[in-house]
Image (cartoon, rainbow, N blue to C red):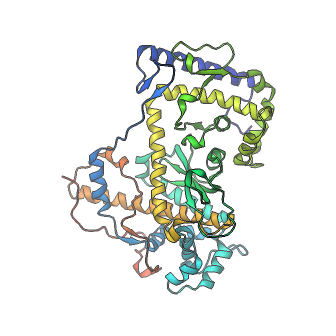
Amino acid sequence: MPVAIDTDVESYLAGRRAALDREIEEVGRLADQGKLEGVDLTGRELVISPVRASTPPEAEKLKEAVYALLPSSKITDVLLDVDSWTGFTDCFTHQRHGRPSDNKPALLSAILADGINLGLNRMADAIRDVTYRQLALVHDWHIREESYRAALVRLIDAHRALPLASVWGAGRTSSSDGQYFRAGGTGAAIADVNARHGNEPGVSFYTHISDQFGPFYTKVIAASASEASHVLDGLLYHDTGLAIEEHYTDTGGVTDHVFGLCQLFGFRFAPRIRDIKERKLYLLPDQKAPASLAPLVGGVIDREHIAVHWDQLLRLATSIRTGTTTSSAMLKKLSAYPRQNGLAKAVREIGRIERTLFTLDWIKNPELRRRAHLGLNKGEARNALARAVYFCRLGEVHDRSFEHQFFSASGLNLLVAAIILWNTKYLEVAYTELRRQGRMIDEDLLRHVAPLGWEHIGLTGDYVWSTADQSPTGTLRPLRQRQSLLAA
């Protein structure tokens, strides 16, 4: 069956009991010895010290020095270069005859209009030799959901193949987060109002990013929607070569149902939970917690209920994995069911087992806390780049139809992925140049320099697709020649 757990319920529960016994015994022993780093269990509640930033000052100097060498380029040059490396524009085929567009400037302009939130009308005014009619035709016939996703796959796979990408991670972990955009304009708002962002309507672009900084999945969700329902979509439905094993979210992506389904599909869910001290531990029947952990225990897992609904759980997982339904659709239904619904309760009970195991590991393992903190910081840094790229119309989503909002989110994510790929390629060359100049570079500092800078990329002005300015195939643009800021 397409699940990552033992399909025999008795074997599964026996394995989970053994894992709980080991974790409880180890955490209790470490607590009694006072060896839990950054954790206080002496009171009646759990207190965990926050993870502090650990970027060394030398990394900031290296970042300034290496970015000072990157070529100053327009966003149009970046897209032309990336297309010459990956051929991502070939993914935008005609809906009728399936051939790529023969008007590449119009196609790239339409993608750019989606990504920077300019719109086709204003893009036609900002670009040379491309009319609004050409933009509209290309957008209607070549740009669609599957085209954007296929193009993104090419960029992500090209990026993870670069040697420098492995410095940031192995492509085994990821994080996801929603980025809020106001829905400007007038008229009846389709987007929902979210009290956290004021009393104006808006939407969220929910994006998954790998530990190598590749934004491999994005979707549009209502601003008031729970992010937890969409966590598994990016892990299950991306088409890249990434093999994600561990995933991080903030508190907004956490429910027991997500813990349960992640376990069924073999993903380790490791969220950074803001109110973790208020989330009680749950043990299986006849399990006991040591005195140091007893105040954290909130109840007993209903083992018999899991056993009774085990076949339904396996059918649910199979339906999601085979595409009969989506994980987000089922998670929304499970969370909306009344508490007495058997399947919803069974998923919740499995989730409580997995959340308990995760919490015990979170308490004893400072490295897990640092990994989750770092993974979420990468997503937040990517959001800063996305905000800079999505600058037109005050960064507000004016198109209220879901299709246009999806095009905006996908175009933005494609531009961000292109910039990340372009930066990574040139960072490799810049590091080589610094070494040629005799600079000593600590290899451990490279992981602190992210490919998310945009100060050297011109995002505004007239957009010109000039092949005369494009580097010949197989070559790169020359680096800027200026004094390195890195101390020798």
Using the image as rendered, state which of residue 438 and residue 332 is in the foreground: 332
Q: Residue at x 43, y 78 (%)?
A: 461
Quarter of the view holding residue 24? top right
Q: In the image, residue 188 lies at what x, y percent?
A: 69, 66
Looking at the image, is 59 positioned above or below residue 273? below
Query: Horizontal placement of 274 versus 288: left or right?
Result: left
Quadrant housing the N terminus = top right
* Location of residue 367 in the rendering, given as x and y in whole percent from the top left corner: 44, 32
**Residue depicted at 81% across the width and 26% down the height:** 308
Report which quarter residue 423 is drawn in. Answer: bottom left
Instruction: Judge whether residue 37 can be spotted in this image.
Output: yes
Q: In the picture shown, does residue 14 fall above or below 366?
A: above
Q: For this view, does 31 lie left or right of residue 151?
A: left
Point out residue 334 in the picture as x, y percentages from the top left corner.
Answer: 74, 40
**What residue is at 80 percent from the left and 29 percent from the top?**
309
Left/right placement of residue 142 relative to residue 247 reads right
The quadrant holding residue 249 is top right
Query: How many numbered markers are drawn?
Result: 0
Give the camera-side residue of 280 and 209: 280
Residue 342 lies, in percent from the top left, at: 80, 32
- Please tell me whether residue 361 is drawn above or below residue 393 in the rendered image: above
From the viewer's perspective, tell me whether residue 247 is left or right of residue 187: left
Furthest residue to the left? Answer: 488
> Does residue 212 appear in the picture of this structure?
no
